[in-house]
Image (tube, helix red, strand yellow):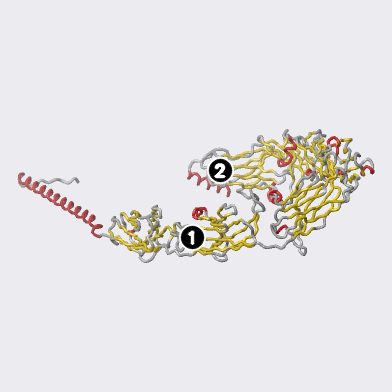
Amino acid sequence: MERRVRALALLAVLLCVGQSQARIVKVPPGPLVRVEGEPVSIRCDVTQYDGPREQEFDWIMSKEDKRRINIISTMESDFTDAALRSRVASGDITIKRLQDNVVELRVKAVTAQDSGTYWCRTPSTDSVTSGNYEAQVILTVIPKSLKVSPQAPPPVVPEGSDLVLACNVTRDLTHSTYLSVSWSVKKAASPEELLTFGPGEGVTVGVGVAQRFLDGGVRFLPGRNGVFQLVISRAMASDSGVYGCTGTEWTSENRKWVQIVQSVTEMGRVTVTPTDQSLTVKTSSPSSSSLLLYPGDTLTLTCSVAADTLDALALEVGWLADGRELIRMERGGVVSSNSSKGAGLSLERTGAGEYRLKLREVSGADGGRYACRTRAFVKQGGAWLQTADKTSDAVTVKVSEIKPNLTLTLKAALAPTTTDDPAELDCNVSAIAHLPAQSRLAVKWEHAPGDANNPATAHTVASLDAHGNLIPGPVYAERLKGGAVALSRVQPNAFKLRFLQMQDVDSGEYVCTVSSWSVSSQGDATQTSEYKSPPLPVRWVRKNPVVNVAAKTVREASVGGATFEMSCKAFPENLDDPGFSVEIQWQDGLGGDNKTIMTLNPDNVMQHGPGTEPNRRDALVLTKSGAAEFRFRLAGVQLSDKGYYWCKVTAFKKQKPGQTWTKVVSSESNKVRIDFQENGLSFSINLHSNSSSVFPMETATMECSLTLSGSSPQTGSVAYEVRWYFSRLRGGGAPVLVGSMSRFGVVSKALRNSSSDVSVERKDADSFLLSIHGTQSSDSGEYQCFVTPWYVSAATGAWTEAGELTSSRLFLTVRFAVWDSLKLPLLYGAAASLVVGLLSVLLGLLFARCCRNGGRSGGRNGGVPILFPDKD
């Protein structure tokens, strides 16, 4: 009864609103097929309806006997049939409102008894009955028969072998349903999808194996009786993980696949053992006696490679001698050699995983530690992926030779007595009777700076190798290249080190090291012995070079825009024919940060430093005015140039003409100061008006004038920024911006509520006008002028902002004219009174004339009045 009353009330409201549209109630087209025990949801929506936005819904079910059973309603709590109340109360059957006009019937676990026709009904709220008010869909519940039975994969798979994942997915074909099977692997927290077959005939591949699937490395093989296989060819270590198989049963609804039941089963953990764990590489020789050879013998070594999946691997094998690769066989069998032995060195494959090295006619240089290095590859798609890299234990090969016994003598053939003196050191080798005929000597010269009580780490001056090549040390490389230091072999067993001019850093101890080298017929050299001479001290009394620098002001800058000039002179001591570089340094105050203004190198090349502004570079000059004197000039000084200036002079020397400069010593001069005061300009402001009281609609003009004092500015070197403000109250109230003019002459006007208009103009160089056109009473109030002067600084040459100026306040009164406001109404009233009076006179005359005419007519008729009867 309650429901009918609510429906009638809604219908009555809608009848007052007007005509309704055609109501449409929709449910899924169906028929729906679901699996027993699985959740079910059926959506229902209504459109094109009148009435409230939130609509009410009833769900009703009917079976083959056509009897309808009330399921649930959004309007009535007692709508549910007695047979279903327990399921509704337990939450097994619910209705969920998704929107105002959309609901969803939900069943947590559907049963076979739930098969039937489901009706979604909406009570009418429309003003006119039109459309449909209920829709139906058939639900068929089938038994749950999906079974997923995977075969356990092998727990351990060697890298490079195939991994087969088999899964059996079946169901009872009681209705037209479809199956899909998918595989996944869990390596971290979340599983990774590999491949899915179905529903239908389609195959979906995961992103991580998409390329391998295209290359054939991942394959899907459908079998019989519901058995499906996923084959991962040439498995890698990254394929390790927990694999799972998922079977899904689908139905087709409205040309779309709908999942009705799914079963996920874990297949088991698979560990792919890396090739590196099973790969072994061993080096052996035919006999132990072959590891000790004599010149002319043949060296034979065998490399044995083994792995769990050797047949699935492609191998690259190389032989190393003391870490240097001699020869290598690529995956395809191509052999490349890095030795000068030529045909005397060979590498061949003698069997599965067996590789043999042969080195014919060995010499002393062929001795060393030999090892076999193997790289294993697995083919993934069109590319080869390296899976292992191992090197065998080294085998020591010795070639018997007689070791020479050398004796070294180091002496100073020419000893320096002071800095810049030349020096010669001789290193002689004796007792070389046992040196083989094909052997050669190499020498290395080393220098340890410092004195005997405080030695420093030795570094190499230069070396001559067994082939006579000069190898300079890093410290002396520049001097060796220029010829200031020379290294020579004067005899097969005598070596000389020459210095054209000794420097202070050359003082210390010198050692020569001589080594003997055995050279094979192919040109390969092997060191056979090494001997080092006793250290030879080379020292002298030092006279430290000194440079003193003095700076003085040549031209002082006392005002902005003047020219500053400074001279710096160097006074060297213990330096012969030096070259100088100079740096001009600046700081704004004592203890402040230093900046380099300009530099001049020993070759008189001038450069600006990072402390120089690009627009000031033309004002800077740095020249060499004498052999050890420099002149710095700064034109047009500015306030930013104030501070302390000084020179940093560095002395350089050349070992001989044409060589590069070598730094010797540096020194800084005294500091010279630039300091001056800038007076600038001063301004005053005045605001006045010819009349402080105007009538409405008149124009009021105020003038803001400025006066300058101080040095006379040049034309165009002063500009003003002017702003006009208005306050309605005298002596208070928040001022409002009326208009402004920038220093570039750009005028801006603020928005106004009054019907009057304003204009801002420049009367002359120092006067500005504010005019109010068509004044109104709302324009009465105080006006004020604010001016910010700008001028070109004589010191900096840049526009400088002066302090803001504020004028006095000027009160403008817009007077109210009483006669002007009343004269028109009075004039109109007088005219109207005159018109009314004239009309009254005319009417009186007219009635009087009519009365006189009536009296005359009565006399002519015998004095008998003529009576006019009333209409009644």
Mark 2 burial class by Cα count in 10 Å: few <14, some 14-19, many 20+ = many
- 233 to the left or right of 397: left
Q: Which residue is mark 1?
A: 564
Answer whether residue 156 is visible to the viewer in this image: no
The quarter of the picture where residue 548 lies is bottom right
Q: Count the marks: how many? A: 2
- 68 to the left or right of 293: left
Residue 764 in picture, x, y percent from top left = 33, 56
Answer whether residue 302 is visible to the viewer in this image: yes
SS class, disc 2? loop
Residue 869 in picture, x, y percent from top left = 15, 45
Q: Earlier in the sequence, mark 1 or mark 2?
A: 2
Which residue type carries mark 1? Answer: Phe
Mark 1 burial class by Cα count in 10 Å: few <14, some 14-19, many 20+ = many
The quarter of the picture where residue 275 lies is top right
Which residue type carries mark 2? Answer: Ser
578 relative to 221, above or below:
below
540 relative to 10, above or below:
below
User: Which of these two is toward me, 77 or 708?
Assistant: 708
Residue 38 in picture, x, y percent from top left = 73, 44
User: Which of these two is toward me, 94 or 762?
Assistant: 762
Q: Which residue is mark 2?
A: 124
